[in-house]
Image: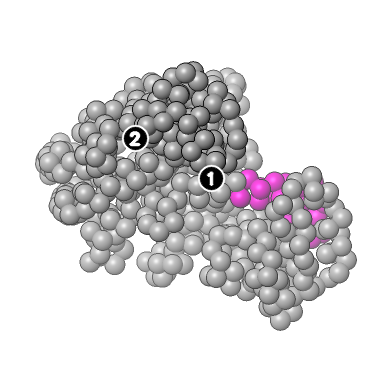
Amino acid sequence: MIKLLIADDEPLVQIGIQSMLNWEDYGIQVCATAMNGAAALELIEEYSPEIVITDIRMPIMNGLELVKTCRETYGRIPLFIILTSYEEFELARQALSYEVLDYLIKLELDPQSLKKSIQKALDRLNELKASETVRSANRPPFLQNYLDKFFLRLLHNLFDNKEQFQIQAKDLNLNFDNQYYVAAHCEILESSSRKMPHEKLMNLYSSTLQMVKDILKRHLACQVISLDLKHFSIIFFFSDISENGRKKMVEALKNAATMVHNYFNVQLMVGIGSIAYSPFQISDSYQDARIAFACASPEDPFRDYNQVQPENIKNSFNITLFKNDLKKAFEEFDTRILYDTLTQMIQLFRSSSVRYLQAIDGACNILYLALSLLPSGEETLTEIFSEDPDNYRSIYRMNSAEQVADWMTRLRDGLCDTLKSKRVSYKEHMISNIQKYIQSHIEERLTLNEISAVFGLSPNYLSALFKKTCGVGFSEYITQMKISRAKTLLLEQDMKVYEIADQLGFESAFYFSKVFKKVSGVSPREFTQQKT
């Protein structure tokens, strides 16, 4: 059961919330109640609730202090839902900077609004649990941003073929049966960002992005993809052709922009792309969105590609010319290809044929690829630009194509040096995560083509890398892991041979027994007799 704690200095409010919903229907247990923030903090330490509903004004320690302390102590869980009143708008705004999940107006609190807020909390918990299943406990995660990497490949058309796309989509439980899609490219503008400490700036952008996600998903099906600290992309999914679809999308974006401006005093700049009638056209929509975005400004922050004048079409840099080489370089840690490809781009930026907006657009896209496709991308990029106060985000201070080319030169040299020094550990880290993936899917029929597609690698490259790193062939390793799992099932589950063969994806009990004996030296029956 998921544990819920209620903190409010009014007993009637506590009782009202407890009786407002049948909590068991949501798999939730009200584990405790508190009359002030200090008492709530002690109960949080004792019960470790996943969700806390707290009043923003309480004696001894208010709700804002409670949230701040828990964030610093426990991280992202518990999730907080804030109870507030109309006149406490400023406190609610501060609370959102600590990534509070939602806020509820006390005078408007009813079962329906509470139900929506709780459902949002349950959805958020599921997201966090899903990310934890692929996070390595002791080192930077290679699969932590698996979903974002998938959508980044989709935005830039980096899939090798439709089969690879379909395998990855299936593995992520993603459905692409929609009638059409529209991509958007966005930036969060904060005029005082340079005066803010890095930690507060991170909180500001992450809170802004979370609010944008929440608001957009109330209106439309969409996927929001974080690109860096202040840029993100959106893919909207439309289930039917409707004249109101695009209008509803624009209204949702403007609503989100208004809300984040009211709460965080930031502005959104948005470029909206053309319609894509299949997932394989989403990259075209995104390319158009970046063209539209290049025409946006703080005075005119929403630009639609359909309204862009022809003379502005060349403002976006077409990265598709380099995509295959960049994909190979980042995924195989090939410094020669990376150096040559980035050198070509730098030479283009220094030529008179490329304008400033094209240069910075191209550089930013390389930045997004490096952040998303490289293990520990954020850490690597921060290290390369450690001498700059704003690290790799110094790209946004470049004022000419020549300056962008200089920034790209630093990026190229830094990436090549880092990949050379960490190539072996990166590859070992990749293989380790592939092994973990195999272990977690050991009861499925695993093939080289499917797993290479999941990780975005070519089958030949994965096969050679696996053999070199592990000293055993890919198929042989899977067989060994399946037999190891079979031994556990034979001893601990008391399962029949044919049941184990079926559960582990063998084509027949006879073939399973044959493989078992080849690996173990004895048949399944003999193995069981030896151990009993």
User: Residue at horizontal 15%, vertical 38%?
Assistant: 337
* Range of magenta residues: 103-125
| C-alpha gap between disc 2 and disc 1 | 26 Å
In the rendered image, the residue lying farthest to the bottom is 60
CB-based contact (under 8 Å), mark 2 and mark 1: no
Q: Examine the rendered structure and indicate whether residue 24 appears above or below residue 458.
A: below
Residue 201 in view here: yes
Q: How many marks?
A: 2
Q: Position of residue 351 (x, y in %)?
A: 11, 40
The amino acid at mark 2 is Tyr
How are the colours assigned in the image? one colour
Which residue corresponds to mark 1? 130
Residue 511 % position (x, y): 44, 19
Please say whether residue 120 is one of the residues in the magenta stretch: yes
Element marked by disc 1: helix
Instruction: Count neighbours of disc 2 (C-alpha within 10 A) and say few if under 14, some if 14 to 19, many if 20 or more.
Output: some
- The C terminus - image quarter: top right
Location of mark 2 (residue): 477
